[in-house]
Image (cartoon, rainbow, N blue to C red):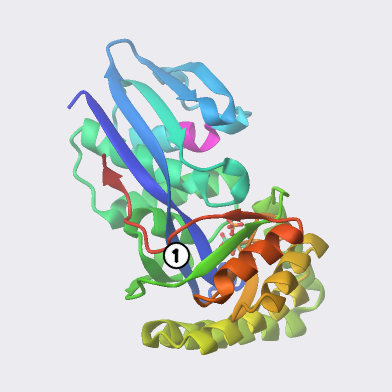
Amino acid sequence: MEKVKVSAPGKLMLFGEHAVVYGFPCIVAAVDQRMQVVAETLARPEIVIDAPDVGIIGYTKKVDLLKNSDNLPKGVQFLETAVKNFFEKYQVKTGLKIKTTSKFSSQFGFGSSSAVTVSVLKALSLLLEIKLSKKELFKIAYRTVLDVQGVGSGFDLAAALWGGVIYYVLGGKRIAPLEVKNLPLVVGYSGVKADTPSLVYQVNQLYRDNRQVIKSVFKSIDILTRQAKKALIKKDFSKIGQLMDINQGLLDALGVNTLKLSRLIFAARKGGALGAKISGAGGGDCMIALVGRESEPIVKSAIRKAGGKVIEVKISAEGVRVE
Ligand code: PMV
């Protein structure tokens, strides 16, 4: 094959963020906002990257220099490291031209880096005809995330690979798809870009300063995530909403809430949402609210009035696929 086009979905964290980094489960949903990667082989031994959404045009690196991966420009970090890890593992040295296109802004925190990582690895396996299972792709993708940002549970990679709604445990120890099709969520973007690794470090500092207390916060998140799994399968919306609110309280206890996110969350609740919480690391990015048919327009307008941007998404999107 000389050219392939692959796409992978972004994600929203429904339950269990932060606690998942400490080995507790989380629940993640793939969303229908996708990253697309077009990859083709080049005759000359170079990697050429175009990622116009993040300001990268015509970035070029000799294949032999891939091992020098310090101080990469931010826009190519995940992509180049993924290529390097793939090439090292499968002993290949092919010239490549890669172009990424995003259907969503990398500002939202929908996991554009993980979707790009997964897409490019899938594209390479097709281009170079190296048959890899999702688990094998997950392994190289997770290695890539740890190489680039040092921390992370890998939940977003699971969403990009498997799609749907997933009950997930650190490092892919458990990746269990849940039968959840229609979960009416409203997503509100806070307008602030969150830096996930620094929030993970911040929570770790709090944990080290208050080990017993924070451990019990994680334990509570663990319990509610397990209950949420059951409630999601049963479509018990009022229970799901309650658990979202409790999860939010515990995220506040972890110190990752912000005034802006809080405003959107309380606005959504006041507008009739069954529950509302941060999705992801906190500090910015998005909040999610579970709504009923009547409350949906009211919640949307309440979020807008409170200064948020409503983003239309559907959950349970398909995982990585050839376009
Ligand atoms: O900020 P996001 O959407 O990438 O979510 C981060 C979730 C954490 O649990 C805080 C980190 C992780 O990798 O699981």
Q: Is residue 69 visible?
A: no
Q: Position of residue 259 (x, y in %)?
A: 82, 64
**Image-quadrant location for residue 306:** bottom right
**x, y percent for residue 181:** 35, 71
Amino acid type at image mark 1? Ala
Q: In the image, is 117 to the left or to the right of 77?
A: left
Residue 175 vertical position relative to residue 194 in the rendered view, above or below? below
Residue 27 visible within the image: yes
Which residue is drawn at the image coordinates 40% and 59% (left, top)? 158
Ligand 1 placement by image quarter: bottom right
Residue 152: x and y, percent?
A: 56, 57
On screen, residue 243 above or below 281: below
Above or below residue 190? Residue 21 is below
Depicted 50 relative to depicted 89: above or below: above
Quadrant of the image for the C terminus? top left
**Is 79 part of what is drawn in magenta?**
yes
Residue occupying image coordinates x 44% and y 33%: 101
Q: Secondary structure at mark 1?
A: strand
* Of residues 119 and 151, the one drawn nearer to the viewer in this rendering: 119
Residue 57 magenta-highlighted: no
Residue at 23% across, 31% down: 127
Question: Which residue position is annotated with label 1?
Answer: 29
First to last magenta residue range: 76-81
Q: Residue at x 73, y 49 (%)?
A: 192
Q: Count all numbered tags in the image, as a single digit.
A: 1
Is 63 displayed left or right of 90 in the figure? Answer: right
The residue lying toward the viewer, choosing from 67 and 180, is: 180
Question: What secondary structure predominates along the stretch shown in magenta?
Answer: helix
The local crowd at label 1, few if under 14, some if 14 to 19, many if 20 or more residues have their Cα within 10 Å, is many
Q: Can you tell which quarter of the image residue 95 is in?
A: top left
